[in-house]
Image (tube, rainbow, N blue to C red):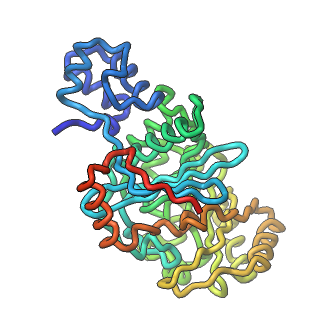
Amino acid sequence: MMANLLDFDLEGLAALCEGLGEKRFRATQLFRWIHQKGASDFDQMSDLAKSLREKLRGKACIEALPVLSQHNSADGTIKWLFDVGDGNAVETVFIPEDDRGTLCVSSQAGCAVGCRFCSTGHQGFSRNLTTAEILAQLWYAEHSLRREFGVSERIISNVVMMGMGEPLQNYGALIPALRVMLDDHAYGLSRRRVTVSTSGVVPFMDRLAQDCPVALAVSLHAPNDALRDSLVPLNRKYPLQELMAACGRYLIHAPRDFITFEYCMLSGVNDTLTHAQQVISLVKDHGVNCKFNLIPFNPFPASGLLRSSPEQVNSFAQYLQDAGIVTTIRKTRGDDIDAACGQLAGDVKDRTRVQHRIALQRSAGRGGPDAVTVVRV
């Protein structure tokens, strides 16, 4: 079986090269060709010895994920649907802004956490993605955007592990992927510009702090255990006392001096000023330096939940700000293509339809990375 070189961080690639009888520095050259230049053909790698290219051709490949569709939003957001096999697909979203380009990356096909307000969780969990499947989303997005815009410099400046899945429940594949994102010979992203979002997998928050501390976002969504138990089922295993203590420990190693708490605003559920007061008490009692990101809920029928009114969201935000907590209200992006927060089930939620589309594309020989259906809305 061919080794997909997107599966390796630099250390892993060096070990592979040594196994082929090559010097370790060849791994750095190879790494740059793959991630900095987007090469997928060994013949493109002109500074590699022909003998090495022949060895690689027989044992390795650089294989992207087949693209099932690409949707372009009116606000510039782009969503790709990638085939990850066995009728499963994952979504990846690029969000352009004036001062940054952010890529929202998936870590699992589906999600096992099952938060009530997230449509991804309602589709169920299929499997963890491999390191190659995580990195392939960044590799494809970065280099296809460069081609589309006719530029050679980096377009994606920020990566957020906030797509489908709970990243810390796929820890073994996540860490090598993060290391590639941070490596100066690959994407060279700052630790402050790579964010892992978690619903609160406490043991792996502690491991992340030791192994690869990047910016951390915690999906809080409720200020007390009773409410959070109903909204974020993982809270029954790791309640708020444990979660907040883990946040305090993480700050010792974090590249930023705060934790971002994500809080989805649900009408009549978690958005009253009483809830806001409980939020203030929660973070101040535990001494966690933080900022809050209030997220307008994106309704879907199975949730039984409603979006808080703009007036209620603003009042909640003002209450937190008056207490000295930095608070922002997330601007909804890509909701016309189901690419906004909590919506990443989109084309994935009907698996029969996805399986049929994959079969059609493969039978037509359209399964490669250039097989893109572009839908502009």
| Residue 75 or residue 25, whichever sits in front | 75
Quadrant of the rendering where the N terminus is positioned: top left
Instruction: Report x, y in % for residue 374.
Output: 49, 55
Instruction: Report x, y in % for residue 90.
Output: 40, 59
253 to 167, vertically: above or below: above
Query: Where is residue 234, by image quadrant?
Result: bottom left
Query: Where is residue 335, by image quadrant?
Result: bottom right
- In the image, taking residue 241 as reference, residue 237 lies left or right, namely left
Quadrant of the rendering where the C terminus is positioned: bottom right
Do we see residue 296 in this rendering?
Answer: yes
Which residue: 72% across, 76% down? 276
Instruction: Report x, y in % for residue 296.
Output: 66, 72
Which residue: 51% across, 44% down? 213
- In the image, taking residue 315 as reference, residue 54 lies left or right, namely left
83 to 178, vertically: above or below: below
313 to 166, vertically: above or below: below
Which residue: 48% across, 64% down? 200
Do we see residue 249 in this rendering?
Answer: no
| Residue 51 or residue 232, whichever sits in front | 51
For the image shown, how many numbered marks are present on the structure?
Answer: 0
- In the image, taking residue 270 as reference, residue 118 lies left or right, namely left
Which residue: 42% across, 51% down? 372
34 to 148, vertically: above or below: above
Extreme-right residue of the structure: 322
- In the image, taking residue 107 as reference, residue 142 lies left or right, namely right
Instruction: Report x, y in % for residue 91.
Output: 45, 58
Query: Where is residue 361, by image quadrant?
Result: bottom left
| Residue 21 or residue 100, whichever sits in front | 100
| Residue 43 or residue 215, whichever sits in front | 43
